[in-house]
Image (cartoon, helix red, strand yellow):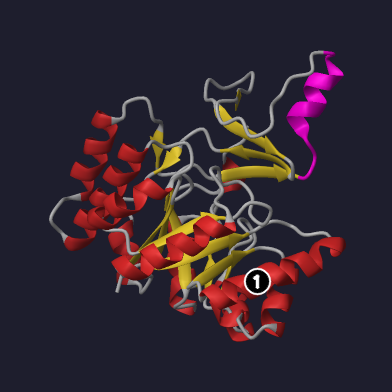
């Protein structure tokens, strides 16, 4: 079965997204996830777990922060709560999360997502051998490299739609900058801030929170023209990131992917529909056809 996992922005999105074709959801919990806005509370997660059971979709949870040693007891308690809730998947990047999950015998729920590090089939397979249920491929590799990885690892997950993280720092870059120029501003958890390089016209979203600063691609990755080729080599797990997108746009994106997968709409038609309906978005095929070492002059 082809899995379309959507990172959701708000609880009201769920039913519409299921109708559009979503088969799984991913969400962040306050204090334990990073780079996903509208993080939910644990009480909300409990409620959402029941909702997902009722509508027969999977529920995955982001535990994708880098944790300090003094946070490990709290982290273990959180993982114990996720075990009790019997969530379907736990996205992580810090190997400390995996070590604690293994102590709790829930390593089979772990999905390794270090954002940039999984670039070959051997690395992906190693995490599967250690007990993970899935591995997310790096976002900066080409389609050819993704297809080669899939031939070596049948538990690969691909981020196919949304803004991609370009850079992350545990430093509070925005706050430090405004403090340096003697113009202090409240910038934490603002989602309408952008960076622009002097040699480019594109705006890169930048978000600072209590854990650091993330910079995102100036474009929205769109994979309608590539998804069938990925499915043909055995990839069946795909993720759509809803960050910086409206509820309507996210629903339309999912609906179009499901139509392309079922063959009821051509990739070209799906691309054109999104571009016409959301002309403000800068849609792109990202790094599918270009290597990252060739993009900076």
Q: Where in the figure is residue 62, as x and y percent of width and height?
A: 57, 60
Name the magenta segment's main secondary structure: helix
Q: Secondary structure at mark 1?
A: helix
Image: 272 above or below 177: below
**Which residue is disc 1 drawn over?**
79
Image: 129 above or below 159: below
Q: Where in the figure is residue 275, as x and y percent of width and height?
A: 28, 32
Magenta highlight on residue 150: no
Q: Is residue 250 visible?
A: yes
Q: Is residue 146 visible?
A: no
- Answer left or right for 34 relative to 10: right
* Picture quadrant of residue 123: bottom right
Q: Which residues are magenta?
A: 170-182
- Answer left or right for 33 relative to 145: right
Residue at (67% x, 77% y) in the render:
101
Q: In the rendered view of the protein, which quadrant contains the N terminus?
A: bottom left
Magenta highlight on residue 172: yes
- Answer left or right for 90 relative to 259: right
| Front in this rendered view, residue 2 or 15 | 15
* Picture quadrant of residue 32: bottom right
Q: Would you call the spot at circle 1 few (<14 residues within 10 Å), some (14-19), or many (20 or more)?
A: many
- Answer left or right for 231 relative to 99: left
Furthest residue toward top: 182
């Amino acid at each position: 079965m082809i899995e379309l996992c959507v990172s959701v922005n708000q609880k009201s999105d769920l039913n519409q997204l299921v109708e559009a074709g979503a088969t799984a959801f991913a969400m962040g919990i306050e204090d334990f996830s990073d780079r996903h806005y509208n993080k939910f509370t644990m009480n909300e997660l409990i409620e959402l777990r029941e909702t997902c059971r009722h509508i027969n979709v999977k529920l995955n949870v982001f535990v994708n922060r880098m944790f300090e040693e003094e946070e490990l007891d709290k982290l273990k308690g959180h993982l114990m709560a996720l075990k009790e809730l019997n969530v379907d998947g736990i996205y992580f990047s810090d190997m400390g999360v995996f070590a604690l999950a293994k102590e709790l015998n829930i390593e089979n729920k772990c999905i390794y997502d270090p954002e940039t590090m999984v670039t070959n089939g051997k690395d992906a397979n190693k995490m599967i051998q250690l007990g993970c249920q899935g591995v997310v491929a790096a976002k900066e590799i080409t389609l050819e490299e993704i297809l080669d990885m899939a031939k070596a690892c049948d538990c690969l997950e691909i981020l196919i739609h949304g803004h991609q993280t370009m850079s992350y720092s545990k430093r509070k870059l925005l706050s430090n900058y405004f403090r340096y120029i003697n113009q202090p501003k409240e910038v934490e958890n603002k989602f309408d801030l952008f960076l622009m390089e002097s040699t480019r016209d594109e705006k890169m979203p930048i978000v600072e929170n209590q854990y650091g600063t993330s910079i995102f691609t100036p474009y929205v990755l769109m994979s309608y023209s590539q998804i069938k080729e990925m499915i043909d080599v055995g990839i069946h797990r795909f993720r759509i990131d809803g960050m910086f997108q409206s509820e309507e746009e996210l629903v339309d994106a999912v609906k179009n992917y499901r139509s392309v997968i079922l063959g009821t709409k051509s990739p070209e038609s799906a691309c054109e529909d999104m571009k016409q309906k959301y002309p403000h978005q800068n849609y792109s095929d990202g790094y599918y056809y270009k290597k990252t070492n060739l993009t900076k002059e």
